[in-house]
Each structure stands twice: as C-alpha cells, then as structure tokens.
Amino acid sequence: MTLRAVTFDFWGTLYQARFDGISREPRTDILQRYLARQGYDFSREQLRAALDESFQRANEIWLSEQRTADAPERVGWILKALGVTLSRDTLAEMTKELEEASLAEKITLVPGAAETLHELANHYALGLISDTGMTPGRVLRQLMARDGILDLFGHCTFSDETGRAKPHPRQFLDTLSQLGVPPEEAVHVGDLAATDIVGARSVGMRAVLFTGVTQGQDPSQADAVIASFDELPLILRQLSQAISVPDPWSSL
C-alpha cells in the first residue's frame, strides 16, 4: 500500500483573501450600479446590510445542511430583502458579475504553495475539495489557471457543482474516486478543523491542519499541523512511515 494522493482545501489553505466589510465593497458597487440603472435609489448602507445578511444566512446553511448557497440563491435573498424585481437578462448579467468580482480582487496564493504543489505533483495525485460561496468553481478554476497550478490537479471538487459541502463524506469520497485512490492512501490538507479535518478523518483519510492563514483552530483531530507549505513534504514522508507504506520520495 502506498500513500498516493493529497487533496487540498482552497480558501485559507492554497489561497488567502479577506472576508470582511472591505472585501465586500466591490459587490456593493455592482449591486448599486445595476439597481440604479433600474431606477432604484438605495444607500450603500442598505445594500451592505442586505449583502451581509445573505452571507450570514449562507453561513448558517453551510453549517447546518452541509451545502453552500450559490450566487443565484444569495442574489435572490438580497433582492427579496430590498423588495426588488429584475428582468431575467438583467438578473443573469448582474449575478455573473457578482460571481466574477473575485477576479479583480487581490486574491493570492499562500507563500510557498505553488512551489510545493509542483514538487508534490511529481509524486502524488493531487485533488482539490473546496466549499464555494458567491464565487463559484468556474471562477476559482480561472484563478488557479492564472497562477499556473490548475493542471497539477487530477480533479477539483467544488460545492456549488456537487450540491454538498465539507464535511459531507461524498465531497472526499467522490474526489478520491476520480483520482482512483482509496481513502487510506490519501491525505487532506485544510485550514478548518470542523470541515477539513473532521470530514477527511470520517472517511478514513489522514488529515493535516494548515495554520498559516486561519488561526485558532483545534488541532486535536489532525494527524499533523503545519504553518507553512515548506513543512508539507516532510510531513507526508512521516505519515507514510507511520502507516508503514513505501516512501515515494525514496528514489530521489
């Protein structure tokens, strides 16, 4: 038996971005522009409040139902809260722009992630398991392609495309099925204990908690904890030895 696959979380693991009031301003701009064109005169405070309420509602669904609310669902909540009705074409155009707002933001790879991924891709099948929100998988793939890492992954699983979210076991098992690797031969790397670590361990995978971006997570259920990607190759070697499997680095 060989350790053959490594899967990764997206937000807070491979990529870092702000999830605060400032990062929501571009979407507030989009809402204000489209609604003004239709004759609606909302203050930025009103739009921010509706947007923030949609994020809070989506977070509650994520935690309670193990699914993520996509942009069309969230936009529906926002417009209902504002008492707004838009034509189908305008709604589709605005929603697409809201989804793609992240392309104009400063969303960057975590330091060392790209170099480590290129190194690991020579030894393991790589997968991505990401919970999405207003930004869907199709846009996240564009960010990955921009940074030259998309082709390193054998399969990418996004919650807006599957209708499920971590820690739902299907997110992990379906990804491994696409990679052709059983859970006991795979490791998942993520930043959230309740979704990444619990979800991976529940299906029989090893789990590595990444603390380089997200702080204050409970490390007790993780097989290992790393604060930088430079540590990951060695951790994978140690996990291989711990489960008595051949070391894929031994030929180096």
Image (tube, rainbow, N blue to C red):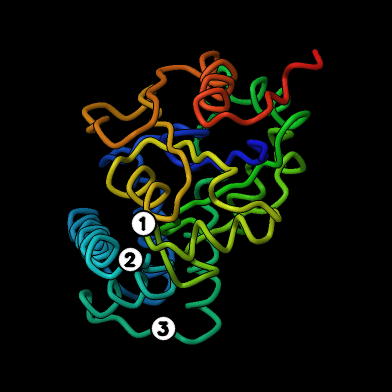
Q: Nearer the viewer, mark 1 or mark 3?
A: 1
User: What residue do we see at 47% from left, 78% from top?
Assistant: 91
Residue 145: quadrant of the picture: top right
Q: Amino acid at mark 2?
A: Gln
The residue beneath circle 3 is 86
Q: Nearer the viewer, mark 2 or mark 3?
A: 2
Question: As displayed, is residue 223 above or below residue 38?
Answer: above
In the image, 174 versus 129, the foreground residue is 174
Asked if the residue at tag 3 contacts the one at tag 2, i.e. Cβ–Cβ closer than 8 Å, the answer is no
189 horizontally vs 193: left or right? right
- Image quarter where the C terminus lies is top right
Residue 109: quadrant of the picture: top right
The residue beneath circle 1 is 167
Looking at the image, the residue that sits furthest to the right is 251
In the image, 155 versus 224, the foreground residue is 224
- 2 or 3: tag closer to the N-terminus: 2
Q: Position of residue 111 (x, y in %)?
A: 54, 18
129 horizontally vs 82: left or right? right
- 1 or 3: tag closer to the N-terminus: 3
